[in-house]
Amino acid sequence: MTIDNRLPATPFAGTVTVPRPCSVPPLTGMSARMSLFETLSRISSPVSSVGRADARRRFTELAKEWHEATDHLSSPSQIAMHPAYQRIIGMGPSAVPFILEDLRRSGGQWYWALHAITDASPVPPGVRHTSREVEEMWLRWGREHGYSEEHGYIDWMVRSVGVGASS
Amino acid sequence: MLAWARLLKFPNLSAANYTITSPENPDYNCAAWAAGDDQAWWWPSPDVPECYWPTSRRDGSLDAITEGFGALGYSACESPELESDYEKVAIFANDDGPTHVARQLSTGRWTSKLGKLEDIDHSTLADIESDLYGRPVLFMRRPLEEQEEANT
């Protein structure tokens, strides 16, 4: 079997395939899910560590450029139009763990990017929330959707091949 | 003193015309600070419910900013000159739309929160005119008693 070690440029467009053993009865339920998860973890581990390091390096460079250029601005649309911010959005779900980490560490208007990438809206509109409350709602959403710093990348890969949905 | 890279964004600032009054804080921005809130990010942003705005119009326009401060008791006025019975705000805009709100202090000087960066106290509105903030395009005022009621 040949595995394409290149990461997809955009999420859900990858070519990673998980081999299905034909000589053993198919597993079901949680057993199947764990088995496939472990298989995928082993297969993708080298890919993940390399790809993740690249993604982190790229994110760090872009975020630094964006912070320097826009931290004195107030309008979220003007902040989000910066080219570095747009390129971070272009990184797709692989950027989300880093965005949440930067949000927790430095704050800032990451919400446009989070909406664009995830299509999620964990913050109820029309109500005044403090920035700390907003931040915590997104961090909680990240934890609940597997975007924690430790597991975000592997979770993205699991979802990109539809393991949870098909087993 | 502001970092030199930041000073480059505000070429009219000099050691003689501003002081930093609080450190960087990403929890609030200029519009919140002008409205007396140091816990939330205020902007009439249509696609970002994380931002608070006191009125329903959220199209990012100057009119939306005007309506928001109108809800706080402000109305448009002619000039930024100090009037002892009023508190004033100045709204800045550039070609991209509204960019900044500054609030006048009882001394006649102005206080500005620079995005998620520092608050500064500056002598005049011209001190922060720049390509990025543009220039003040609208002045609003409210009687000081309304300010006291709004803050209670």
Image (tube, grey):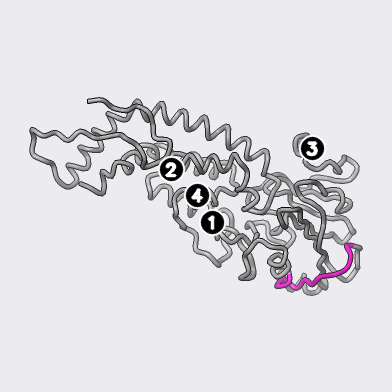
- Compute the Cα span from label 1 to label 3: 33 Å
**Residues in magenta, as a range:** B70-80
- Contact between labelled residues 4 and 2, with CB atoms less than 8 Å apart: no
Write down the quadrant of residue B142 in the picture.
bottom right
In the rendered image, residue B131 lying in the magenta stretch gets the answer: no
Q: Which mark is residue A16?
A: none
- Compute the Cα span from label 1 to label 4: 16 Å
Could you tell me which chain the residue with mark 3 belongs to?
B
- Compute the Cα span from label 3 to label 2: 35 Å
Q: Which residue is mark 1?
A: A133
Query: What amino acid is found at the position of numbered circle 4 in the picture?
Result: Leu
Query: What amino acid is found at the position of numbered circle 1 in the picture?
Result: Glu
Q: Nearer the viewer, mark 1 or mark 4?
A: 4
Residue B73, percent from left and from top = 75, 73
Q: Earlier in the sequence, mark 2 or mark 4?
A: 2
Q: Which mark is residue A93?
A: 2
Quadrant of the frame with the C terminus of chain B: bottom right
Q: Which residue is mark 3?
A: B8
Q: Are marks 2 and 4 on the same chain?
A: yes
Q: Earlier in the sequence, mark 1 or mark 4?
A: 4
In the rendered image, residue B71 lying in the magenta stretch gets the answer: yes
Query: What amino acid is found at the position of numbered circle 3 in the picture?
Result: Leu
Left or right? Give the position of A62 relative to B129.
left
Left or right? Give the position of A150 relative to A98.
left
Task: Label 1, secondary structure: give it.
Answer: helix
Task: Label 4, secondary structure: give it.
Answer: helix
Residue A135, percent from left and from top = 53, 51
Q: Are marks 1 and 2 on the same chain?
A: yes
- Compute the Cα span from label 2 to label 4: 9 Å
Q: Nearer the viewer, mark 1 or mark 2?
A: 2
Could you tell me which chain the residue with mark 4 belongs to?
A
Q: Which residue is mark 4?
A: A114
